[in-house]
Image (cartoon, rainbow, N blue to C red):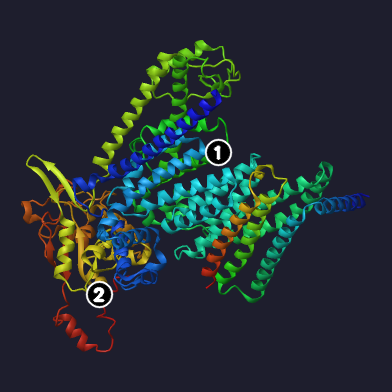
Amino acid sequence: MGRSATTKDAHALFHSLRSAYAATPNHLKIIDLYILFAVATAVIQVAYMAIVGSFPFNSFLSGVLSCVGTAVLAVSLRIQVNKDNKEFKDLPPERAFADFVLCNLVLHLVIINFLG
Amino acid sequence: MAAQETSQSAIFRHAFGNVLSFTVLLLIGVMAFSIRLFSVIKYESVIHEFDPYFNYRVTQFLTKSGVYDFWNWFDDRTWYPLGRVIGGTVYPGLTLTAGTLWRILNSINIPLSVETVCVFTAPVFSAFASWATYLLTKEIKGAGAGLTAAALLAMVPSYISRSVAGSYDNEAVAIFALIFTFYLYIKTLNTGSLFYATLNAIAYFYMVCSWGGYTFIINLIPMHVLLCIVTGRYSPRLYIAYAPLVVLGTLLAALVPVVGFNAVMTSEHFASFLVFIIIHVVALVYYIKGILTPQMFKVAVTLVVSVGMVLCFAVLAVLIALVASSPTKGWSGRSLSLLDPTYASKYIPIIASVSEHQPPTWPSYFMDINVLAFLVPAGIIACFLPLSDASSFAVLYIVTSVYFSGVMVRLMLVLAPAACIMSGIALSEAFDVFTRSIKFHLVGTTQNPQENAGDATKVTQNDVKSEKSEDTVKERSSRKSKKKDKENIEKPSLVSRVEKRLLVLPLETSVMAVFLVVLLGAFYVVHCVWAAAEAYSAPSIVLTSRSHDGLHVFDDFREAYAWLSHNTEVDDKVASWWDYGYQTTAMANRTVIVDNNTWNNTHIATVGTALSSPEKAAWDIFNSLDVKYVLVVFGGLVGYPSDDINKFLWMVRIGGGVFPHIKEPDYLRDGQYRIDSQATPTMLNCLMYKLSYYRFVETDGRGYDKVRNTEIGKKHFKLNHFEEVFTTHHWMVRIYKLKSPRNRIRGKTKRSKSKSGTSKRSTRKKNPWQ
């Protein structure tokens, strides 16, 4: 009895999440897809490290942190571009994207240096 | 018409304010630079102390050989025969900064020597630090507080002590980097701009390059983020301020060779990762809360909490097991000695022996931050009205830095910027109240209703609970007590609930209070200038003393190093206690056995054992290390208290920690350390005693030691295995040479050697290291 209630709740939750997410604009969904891709790449790298070993450690670190870094920066971009965020309504999306590109540039410069 | 006039006057006032701020900041920078020049005026433009000599030598190498050679430098002139990987064990920020400055100045044809650039780097960066304090405090409270805080930081004695002209040490640039990183963090938090987040990461990188104290930043910022989350102040700006900093900051920290993989593997950084995970969870929760309806959200919470809790516990258990498996729980020795102040004295005598690592005394607080010590509580209260993210950060900063300054006197330096910020806020708020009262009384209510309508006039009261604005009697009595006792400025301030009734102080009170606050500032300035001139300007490589027949200058250290560099071979090894290692390599240019880096405890213990052993055993140890000369510092003739005999017990302790045949009680008579006739035979026969007091009785006939205030125990003795080659003018530095072993072994030893040719056991000398 309790279990079916929880499964019913889970189903209802899943449906409402799905419908709410479908309402988000397309450009935000593209950013979400990019974030998902970055995290998936990081997971694959960690799995590979678990199989093969962590030498050279700096390459592993720079690879994983580049994926995590781009994911974090993409989340920041999404926050700044999202029209529902009242704090950022004065920020033009071009400026947000330019900041995103600059930060990515610095991140990848460091990654390339650290990759060895 | 009227609107245009007011807007024009507003623009004019705005412009005038900007020009005034700029002029004041320029003057603050000039003052910060000039107040640190006392040592150059009183002595000369010379590098002070011990550590700066190492930095100076590294900078010399950098300017001569270039960045690539510096990055890969393996130094074989220290820690003989181990050597030291300079590229991998030094924080390169300071040297690279000074090297860049020198290169730029030389390229525009200002031919300053490397030494001049090194000596004046610290005052220049202290001017930058005061400007950074202005920026940081402006973000927290406003421009007025910023200017006050900048002026206070330019003069605060604790910062002067580590950044005086000639003190070429890491803290000179590191404090500027610290304040600047905090400023960029607060700026990102206030604006939510990813551009400032990038700059923040780059400033953090500069901080990691400069000083080991960067762990303070990488633990304070996560603590602040956690505080904001827990007090319900999570916002997207917080995420943008924190998450990119962690990723970029970890990567940039791993780039610096000194830190390397410690950036992800030591406990000092785990707090940042933990809060990184927490902030992602919180961000996700807020996002889901935003897109779901409230009852659906409740369902989601119950579902997730039940499943997630089990997962959380499992992960936590694994983590705890991992961390607990290492004996120090993953923390390094220095960090552990900060968290547990008794750790160093129990386990790491080298860290415990450094005088900078002792806890400070109460007078040192008033010496180092003076008036700020009791302005800080007022500032903390002012930060709570109103509480913003930035002001909560300032409060957290002052609280943690007060704790750490209580553990180690060296960390008073980290307290100084926090104290200046808080005091600047307090003074600025106080001035606001007084000047508003004066303005109100002089100008009247009719002319400025627009400004004061939205104003929250503050009323100073004794009691927080009584929020009634009719308590004028109480206010007056509190103000009277303020007149009598000008140090009681820490009264809680309240926001007046009624905007229409402007509560201001009477005119005379405000004028008097302004005068008294200015007087307080004057006392502070007088103290700071005195501290800078008298207490913190000694280069410690040149000593002076005044007596009835004028000024005596003791330049013995440089005399000894110059003698060494002129009268010994380039490859000769010099043994001394580790205090003098950096100076010997930098000024005398000779290879040393141990130096101030103290990275190898066993090597230092070897030298300590040699100095505590009798002559023959000491000769054996030094001979095995290829040592040619031994250098001791002796202050008994002139009364110099920081000589080797006073440090001798530490040598015994450190040596005894590794070689158990050296026992400290052997050198003490009834638990007392003495060198007179009541001293133990072990003490009177050890090498340190003999090298310090050899021929000392010839100076005054009695051998009276002016530091220990007694006549020495053994007065007439000969040295069999060492010969004295140089003693400086005031007997402060004494250099001895190891005598070469005898050409032929005569007497009993030779006969027994020929009898039992192969069995060398009986004639084998006892291994002095066991």
Q: Which of marks 2 and 1 is in front?
A: 1
- The residue labelled by disc 1 is B392
Chain containing the residue with disc 1:
B
Point out residue A62 in the picture as x, y percentages from the top left corner. Answer: 57, 67
Name the residue rendered at 30%, 37% in the picture. B528
Furthest toward the top, the residue is: B473
- Distance between mark 2 and mark 1 Cα atoms: 58 Å
Q: Nearer the viewer, residue B559 or B8?
A: B8
Q: Is residue B256 visible?
A: yes
- The residue labelled by disc 2 is B626
The quarter of the image holding the N terminus of chain B is top right
Chain containing the residue with disc 2:
B
Q: Can residue B662 be seen in this view?
A: no
- Quarter holding residue B85: bottom left
Point out residue B37 in the picture as x, y percentages from the top left corner. Answer: 25, 45
The answer to whether residue B161 is left or right of residue A90 is left
